[in-house]
Image (cartoon, rainbow, N blue to C red):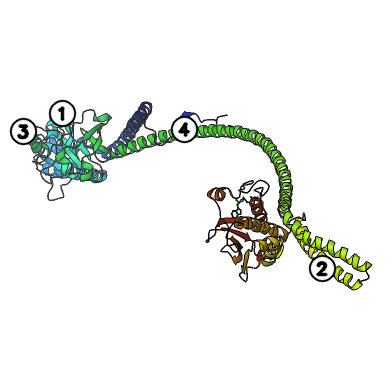
Amino acid sequence: MSPPVMPESDIISPYSLPNPHRVLGVAGLFVVFLLLGLASYRVSENYGVENMRQAASHQLDILGAAIDSEVTRHASVPSAVELNPDVVTLLRAPSEEADIRQAEANRFLQKLNDHLGGPAIFVLDLSGRVVASSDWIFSDNLLGSDLSYMPFFRDAVRGTPARHYAVDHIRHEPGYYFALPIRDESREWAIIGVAVVKSGIREVERRWLAQEAPALIVDRNDVVLLASPPEWRYATLGRQPTAVLERLGRQQFAGQALGAISLDIDLAGADEGRVVRLPKHLRDDVAPAQGARPYLAMARNLPGTAWRIVVFSDLRAVGVQAATHAALSVAALGCLLLGVLYARQRRRLARGREEARAMLELANQELERKVEARTVDLSEAVSGLQREVQERQRAEQTLRAAQNELVQAAKLAVLGQMATGITHELSQPLGAIRTLSANAAEFMRRGEAATAERNLAIVEQLTEQMGNIIGPLKTFARKSPAVSSAVDIGQAVDSALFLFESRLKKDAVIVERHFTPGATTAWCDRNRLQQVLVNLVGNALDAMHDEPVRRLSFSSEASSTGKIALSVVDSGHGFSEEAVAHLFEPFFTTKQPGEGLGLGLTISRDILRDFGGDLMAGPAPGGGARFVVLLPPLSSGSA
Ligand code: ADP
């Protein structure tokens, strides 16, 4: 079964290139953010401007109320002046009592003025001269001044109550003038003079200069009467003809130059609030940093006067607030989007986890199934192996038995080869025994017991001699299991040589022995080692049979591997090339049929390897053969 695969759409690669859909999505999102930001900015700006408008309106209310209480509260005073008989008498006709009347009128006006708390009150005759004044006690009083040039006088003398701002010539004090014609009841209400009250505007001025943002009071001619900043006083809202300005300056402002500054502000529609910017040349008048800002200009006509009050509100705070709101709404949308994305991601992760869990479960089930199948396979394999091991053990037992039989067969073969020699060895003493025992019987019949006894003694010696020949053969031929023990190498060599004693003598073989001390005792099976040596000696004797010099030497030494190396060197014909290649192969022999089976060397090597030794062959220096028998040292048995 193939492993479950994640759907491709769920794989999020941080290196994946943006596809067109994604780009469009991002662009769309950007546009949405932009639109939202703009909309928020607009709404917040409108809201802020509306708030500012209300605040400005409130400010205008307060300023208006303040001006009203300062300036217009004296509007009714001229009516009171008209009612005073001294004033009327003074104006009716200059008489000899004029001085008295004037003094009375002055006192009345002073009293009224004191009572009202500060405005200047005075009376003009029809020529515009001040005939009575509340400030008569001061040296710089208005008495006698000609105010006929004042617009309020001209209006009032024509029968129209007048009111306006003006600056007087004497003290150069600005003020608001209310003028009323004084009529003579006895002359059919003919106008005989003008009553004037002048309100000081110091308090209004003080209040005005305290304004932080620009604020103006403008008269009906668009001349600025009061301003914050104060430099704008006597400026004009727009540019006006010089002649008009000069006339106004003369009549109303005691010769003050007007319109030196033009504010270039259009207040049309400013009653509802209008956004304006100050012209460049005026920006330094307010704090330089504020000059370039947009302002909300709001104007209001002051009831009871010909004034307009204008206040300017800094719109920067609105802009900042609108920008903040736009940023906040964009951030909120961003948070909302992030929240949605987060929720989606969570859902996706949860789904992924669920799928992973399901896949894991499937994989587990698959694994369990495989393990189960593999366990069955393994147990079958194990039982198969067990069967195989048993079979191998049986085969090994059979092999070992066959090997033992083979060893035994080889021994018997050697014995068979030696049979002729042995028979020859035994036949001599046997014949002698036969003759001696016959002679002994004869000597006994003859009564020569002593001679018979001598013969029998020789027979005894001969039988002992025969026993000595047969004894080692019995030992050699015995079928015995291999048991390792300490074996003297010299003795083992002697035992092997003993079996070939007659052949050695017959062939006049020179036997040499050289055993290095420390390499004289091996740990192996004595009988098997003897069998190996018998085999090697037999082969050496066969090889040397036709050689003129027959020398057989044995030497032992410790090899570099720690084993004992016993060399058996003969002076025989040596090995042919073929013999070297196949020496240890079973049934390889160069001997005549009946003389060799070709198993001797094979069995000898197996025997030696069985107890940890080995057998090697090679040419001897003098041309014969050299066999090296490697044997475990004594130390390997005691270890
Ligand atoms: P067999 O003696 O029955 O032939 P072996 O296995 O003992 O069997 O010997 C195999 C062959 O090895 C011999 O036939 C002989 O050709 C060769 N061989 C063994 N020993 C010697 C030796 N000392 N010198 C020369 N050839 C030898």
SS for tag 3? helix
Instruction: Give whichever of discs 4 and 3 has the lower sequence position.
Output: 4
| Badge nearest the viewer, 1 or 3 | 3
Q: Is residue 37 above or below residue 486?
A: above
SS for tag 1? loop
Front residue of 15 and 109: 15
Outermost residue to the front:
446
Q: CA distance from mark 1 to mark 2?
A: 201 Å
- Which of the 4 image quadrants contains residue 103? top left
Ligand 1 near label 1 (Cβ, under 8 Å)? Answer: no
Front residue of 22 and 221: 22
| 240 relative to 434 in the view: left or right | left
Proximity of marks 4 and 2: CB atoms separated by less than 8 Å: no
Residue 243 lies, in percent from the top left, at: 5, 33
- Which of the 4 image quadrants contains residue 288? top left
Q: Residues within 10 Å of mark 3 (few under 14, many from 20)?
A: few
Instruction: Give whichever of discs 1 and 4 has the lower sequence position.
Output: 4
Proximity of marks 1 and 3: CB atoms separated by less than 8 Å: no
| Disc number placed over residue 159 in the picture, else none | 1
| Residue 97 can be seen in this image | no
Instruction: Give whichever of discs 1 and 2 has the lower sequence position.
Output: 1
Residue picked out by circle 2: 461
| Disc number placed over residue 13 in the picture, else none | none
Residue picked out by circle 4: 11
Disc 2 residue type (three-letter):
Gln
Q: Residues within 10 Å of mark 2 (few under 14, many from 20)?
A: some
Residue 614 lies, in percent from the top left, at: 62, 56
Residue sitting at x 63%, y 58%: 541
Residue picked out by circle 3: 243
Residue 317 lies, in percent from the top left, at: 31, 40
| Badge nearest the viewer, 3 or 2 | 2
Disc 4 residue type (three-letter):
Ile
